[in-house]
Amino acid sequence: MHVRVLGSSSAGNCTVLWDDHRALLIDIGFSARYISRHLRTVGLTLRDVAGVVITHMHGDHVHPFTLSSLMALGIPIYAPYAVLEVLCDQFRDARKARGTPRLRPIASGHADVGPFAVDACPVPHDAPGGCFAYAVSAETLSGTAKATIATDLGYVPEGLTAHCADSHVLVVESNHDAEMLETSRRPLWLKERIRTIGHLSNDQSGRFVRDILSASRFHPEAVVLAHVSKECNTNARAVASMQKNLQEHGAHAVRVVETFRNAPNETVSFCM
């Protein structure tokens, strides 16, 4: 399985996972042209996409015109019932597709999307319809390969660590440096929102990953740091913080991979 974050920030988010045959998109916060262009760099087209999975309904995760374009291509959209209801409330194309195979609920927290098994776990975030982390698994000749995407959470809820355990790749947010947030010019209400129900800090992200490793039977191939704030963080700070936490845990071999605001990061490939 391969994982590549096509871009991640408050301006847009999209991650692609693929095997030798099909691909899966997690969120579509960029234009269809942008997504298609960067899929081509790894030998994929939108026709290879088995489905789109939506984490939540904030605008940096769902681009309305991209949603319409992908639905017109017949690519199904997957999300828990509450998220799909908000999608239908906000977008006419989704409303017209209600009850058709173009909108597919992740019922009881699980869905099969092409060759991928997708398992949802609710996370705390101030999004209508809720917000979800996803574990994506695929069967290989050697066993089950797993990647987990967990971003946009104000704190780590009960059950999420176990949900992320035994992942070969972890995509987790490392949104802000606590000191940079505190000294920023952002209004007090926004700082409080970020700290309580918005996003994880570098320190929180590091502790989260250490807890995941403690609950796992093996260490992941890589930890990918997503949703890094432009104003209240830097990639260098986020990477250094995560590396420190991994080293203190004894996980020296785990790679820390940065993401970018308007460009894809490196592809992380793994197998059993």
Image (cartoon, grey):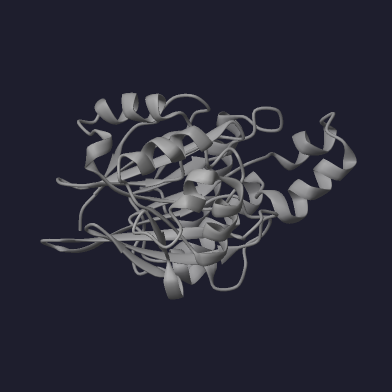
User: Measuring 48% from the left and 49% from the top, which residue is drawn there?
Assistant: 94
Between residues 166 and 103, which one lies in front from this camera angle? 103
The picture places residue 42, in percent across and down from the top left corner, at 24, 31
User: Measuring 44% from the left and 38% from the top, which residue is drawn there?
Assistant: 68
Q: Residue furthest front?
A: 96
- Specify whether residue 215 is in view: no
> Is 45 drawn above or below residue 271 in the view shown?
above
User: Measuring 51% from the left and 56% from the top, which residue is drawn there?
Assistant: 209
Residue 83 placement: quadrant: bottom right
Question: Quarter of the image containing the C terminus?
Answer: bottom left
The picture places residue 186, in percent across and down from the top left corner, at 83, 33
Between residues 230 and 30, which one lies in front from this camera angle? 30
> Is 213 drawn above or below residue 23 in the view shown?
below
Q: Is residue 140 left or right of residue 32?
A: left
The picture places residue 122, in percent across and down from the top left corner, at 56, 65
The picture places residue 39, in percent across and down from the top left corner, at 29, 31
User: Measuring 64% from the left and 34% from the top, which residue is drawn there?
Assistant: 229
